[in-house]
Image (cartoon, rainbow, N blue to C red):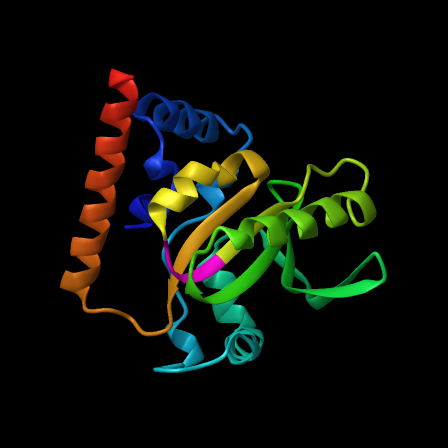
Amino acid sequence: MLYERTLISRKPEDVIKTELSTVRQGGAISPDLVFKSPYFLDFTGLKGYYSEKKLEDMIISGMQQFLMELGNGFSFVDRQKRIIIDGEDFYLDLLFYHRKLHRLVAIDLKRTKFQAAYKGQMELYLRWLDKYERQPGEESPLGLLLCAAGNNEQIQLLQLGDAGIQVAQYYTELPDKDILRAQLQKEIAQAKLRLENQKED
């Protein structure tokens, strides 16, 4: 299940084998092995309607569980990070640092499905962090958009990975195991179909 949830599972098979081999040999890991989808945020206790602010509050109060769900290597840096651009204030929901990737990781919480406009907002945050917060020896910052649902075709067309942005779905309630298994199998089948289409092109 963890393998299927990591974003590497959406890559071509030869890329997957290469990346796993690199990790086994003690080499550097890629962002696709660090980020996964979906994330289970059931520890927040949120059900039905809730605001992004409430989701953020519950994540902060359950920081230990959130860090465990994110995976190894994440360290908390800031909440509602203030970013001033052209005299205008912007606020990044959550800021982390990943020790193995040697990068800042900006997380923006969305209680809706992914929208194309989110890319521009996250790119702005990442460029600012790269200019003003990146330390010597660190890699460029990465962004994670945590959305209530995905829009897979939009995500693919926007080529978010090239911009250092990942999109992941989250659940505030654990779904039934059979529903979750069916959804994961559907995602895998769609990924295989995309790979087959790419090979034909």
Tell me: residue 197, above or below residue 184: above
Residue 184 image point, x, y percent:
23, 51
Relative placement, left or right, of 13 versus 79 is left
Relative placement, left or right, of 181 versus 6 is left
Tell me: residue 44, above or below residue 84: below
Task: Tell me the chief SS of the magenta region.
Answer: strand
Q: Is residue 13 magenta?
A: no
Q: Residue at x 47, y 59 (%)?
A: 146
Residue 24 image point, x, y percent:
43, 29
Q: Residue at x 21, y 32 (%)?
A: 193
Report how many numbered discs are placed on residues in the image: 0
Tell me: residue 177, above or below residue 196: below
Q: Is residue 148 magenta?
A: yes
Q: Residue at x 42, y 54 (%)?
A: 168
Q: Residue at x 39, y 63 (%)?
A: 170
Q: Quadrant of the C terminus?
A: top left
Give whichever of 16, 93 is nearer the camera: 93
* Farthest residue, direction right: 87
Residue 119 image point, x, y percent:
55, 49
Tell me: residue 152, above or below residue 136: below
Residue 49 image point, x, y percent:
39, 82
Tell me which segment is drawn in magenta. 146-150
Give whichever of 30, 163 is nearer the camera: 163
Relative placement, left or right, of 162 versus 9 is right
- Image quarter for residue 137? top right
- Image quarter for residue 17? top left
